[in-house]
Amino acid sequence: MGTIHARAMSSRTALLVMCVATAVSSNCEAQTNNPVVKVHAFEREVVGGIPGGPPGVGAQARQMRYIIYLETPPKTDVAVDGVWMKSRFHSADTEIKKAPVRFESPVKLADDTKNVAVPPTTNTVTEITVKEPVPDRTPDAHASKLLGENAAVVQLSYSGKTVFVPVKRFERREPLYMR
């Protein structure tokens, strides 16, 4: 009976140590100072010409457009500094959107859920359109670590501090046709 009691105590001690370690690691500043409630990230190919038709005359090569939506609690004041992708810092355009947010599309899709980028929410929704890379910027150690584990990292200014918001992956959506 003593051996069983000792194993149970050992298991409880191990569990306690794991809980303390988890609590310590999840209390770092980047975690607790992050105002973002949810991230929605999408990539869309930009195609010149008419949907289903040949490319337009003199059409540019196909490009990808990356759009990220951040949900923050109402009245949260954040500024988007830019977006890190593939170890390069990109400038970004931002705009506050009213939810639900829908994709621009020349064709109304039968499955309307594919047109929804952000479902209805009472949170503030910030749309971030990733632009061109900014020369001569290199990620610091923290941003580099996050980039190694994610598709992108949004760099914010919040409460006087720099905050990094990881973007796990970009969901691919229907192409965006430009005329």
Image (cartoon, helix red, strand yellow):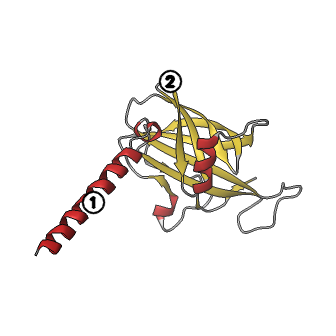
Which residue: 37% across, 45% down? 24
Tell us which disc is closer to us: 1 or 2.
Answer: 1
Q: Nearer the viewer, residue 116 or 4?
A: 4
Q: Nearer the viewer, residue 111 or 38?
A: 38
**Would you say the residues marked 1 and 2 are in contact, meaning their CB atoms lie under 8 Å apart?**
no
Query: From the viewer's perspective, is 140 left or right of 113?
Result: right
Tell me where residue 135 sits by quadrant. Answer: top right
Whether 7 is drawn above or below 31: the answer is below
Element under disc 2: loop
Query: From the viewer's perspective, is 47 left or right of 70?
Result: right
Q: Amino acid at mark 2?
A: Gly
Query: From the viewer's perspective, is 36 left or right of 8?
Result: right
Instruction: Quickly name the residue at label 1.
Output: 15
Which residue: 19% across, 63% down? 9
Image location (x, y in percent) of residue 8: 19, 68
Residue 51 at least partly seen: yes
Q: Which mark is residue 115?
A: none
Pick whichever of labels 1 and 2 is earlier in the sequence: 1
Image location (x, y in percent) of residue 171: 56, 60
Quarter of the image that includes the N terminus: bottom left
Whether 11 is drawn above or below 28: the answer is below
* Mark 2 neighbour class, 10 Å CA radius: few under 14, some 14 to 19, many 20 or more: few
Residue 67 at least partly seen: no
Element under disc 1: helix
Tell me where residue 59 sits by quadrant. Answer: bottom right
Instruction: Quickly name the residue at label 2.
Output: 160
Q: Amino acid at mark 1?
A: Leu
* Mark 1 neighbour class, 10 Å CA radius: few under 14, some 14 to 19, many 20 or more: few
